[in-house]
Image (cartoon, rainbow, N blue to C red):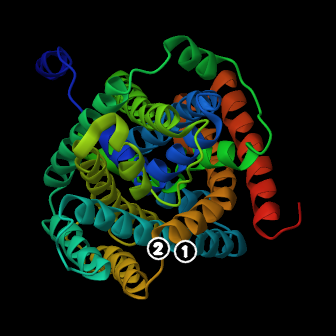
Amino acid sequence: MAISAEKAKKRKGFRFGPGALVTAAFIGPGTITTCSIAGAGFGYALLWGLVFSVIATIVLQEMSSRLGIISRQGLGEALRKHFNQPVTKILTALLVISAITIGNAAFETGNLLGASIGLQLLFPNSAIPIGIWATSIGFIASAVLFAGSYKIIERSLIGLVIVMSLTFLTTAFIVNPEITAVFKGMFIPTFPDGSLLAIAGLIGTTVVPYNLFLHASAVQERWKDADDLPEARRDIFVSVILGGAISMAIVITSAAAFFGVNGSISSGADLAVQLEPLLGSYAKYFIGIGLFAAGISSAITAPLAAAYATAGVLGWKKDLKSKHFRMIWLGIIGIGIAFSLFGFRPIEAILFAQAANGILLPVIAIYLLWVMNSQQVMGENTNNRLTNFIGFAVVLIAFSLGIRSLLHVFGLI
C-alpha cells in the first residue's frame, strides 16, 4: 500500500520526464532549417506532414518506452538478446552501430554548427570563427555528459526545451498568421508541385531513429514496472506534442515572412534577416536564442543516444560513468567538432543527416516492431493490432519517401 500511495502522490501533477529528451533531440538546427524551407516554399500547406510526424513519433516512442520499462532493456540490448544466432547477431550489431555512428556524427556536426550560428547572431560583433564556437559548444556538451548524472542531463534539456518553446511560439504569435489557412494546412493533406522532398524532410527531422534507443534506456532511470506505463505515456504525449507545436510555429513564422516573396533560405540564420520587417531588431535575438538552444540540446542527446545504442548492442555497461560508455559519446562529439573545423557548411551537414535518416528510420523501426511483438521480451505487453498497423504504416511511408529522396539526391528522378 505504501508503494501505491507513493505512486499516486507522484501522479497528481505532471512533470516532464524522459520525453523531454526526445523533444530536445528532434528540435535541432535541422528542424529549424527544414521547417523554415517548408514554410517559405509552400506556406501552411505542409503542416499536415508535421501532424503525421507527431502521431508517428508518439506511437514509436511509446513502444520504445514500454520496451524499456517492461523488459528493463534498451533497444540495442533487446536486439542483441533477441537475435541470438551468431550470423544475425553480428549483422544486427554491424548495421545498428554503423548506422547510428554515421547518422549521429552527421547530426552532431549540424547541431554544433547550428548552435554556433545562434551565438554569432547573438554576438554579431564577435570575431570568433564558427569552428571555435562549435568546439566550445562541444566542450559544454561533454561537460554535461561527464557530470554522469541523468537528472542533471534531464533538467538541462527540460530548460532548453522551455527556452525553445517560448522563443518560437512567441514568434509565431507575433507574426499573426491566418488561422483558417493554418488549420486547413494541418488537417487537409496536399502535395504541391515540388513538395515531396520537403514532406520527407519534415518527417525525417521529427521521427528521429536514435531517439528510439535513447528513450528505451532513459525511461529505466525514471520508471520501474507496468504500473508506470500510464505516466510514461502521458510524458511522451505531452513532450512530443510540445515539440510538434514548436516545429509548426517555425513553419508558420517562415510562411508569414517568406511565402509568396522572392527570398530564399539557405540556412536557419537567413530567417533572422528576413524576419526583420516583422520583428525589427529583435529578429536576430529570437532566432539566435532558438538556434543555440536547439543546437546544444541536440548536441547532448545525439552522442548520448549513440552510446546507449552501441553499448546495448555490444553488451557493455550502460552507465553514464562507464569508461566504454564515455568513449562512445566522446567519439561522436569529437567527430562533430572535427567536421565543424573542416569548414563544412551547416546546411550541407544537415542535408547529409537527413539523407542518412531516410534509410535509417525504416530499418530501426522494423527492428523495434519485431521486438515489440515478441512475447519472450514483452510478455503480455506486446503491441496490439492498432499499434502494429500505425507502426508498419510509418515504416512504409518513411521507406518510400526515403528512397525517393535518395534517388533525387543522386539525380535519378
Q: Residue furthest right?
A: 412
In this rendering, the answer to whether 57 lies above or below 403 is above
Return the residue nearer the eye: 227 or 44. Answer: 44
In this rendering, the answer to whether 169 lies above or below 71 is above
Q: Position of residue 367 (x, y in %)?
A: 64, 52
What residue did someone put label 2 on? 105
- The C terminus sits in image quarter: bottom right
Query: What type is the residue that disc 1 sits on?
Result: Ile
- The N terminus sits in image quarter: top left
Circle 2 residues within 10 Å: few <14, some 14–19, many ≥20: many
Q: Position of residue 188 (x, y in %)?
A: 69, 18
Q: Residue 102 — which label?
A: 1
| Quarter assignment of residue 11 | top left
Residue visible at 41% across and 69% down in the picture: 108
SS for dot 2:
helix
Q: Position of residue 260 (x, y in %)?
A: 61, 36
- The mark total stands at 2
| Quarter assignment of residue 319 | bottom left
Q: Position of residue 283 (x, y in %)?
A: 28, 44
1 and 2 marks in contact (CB < 8 Å): yes
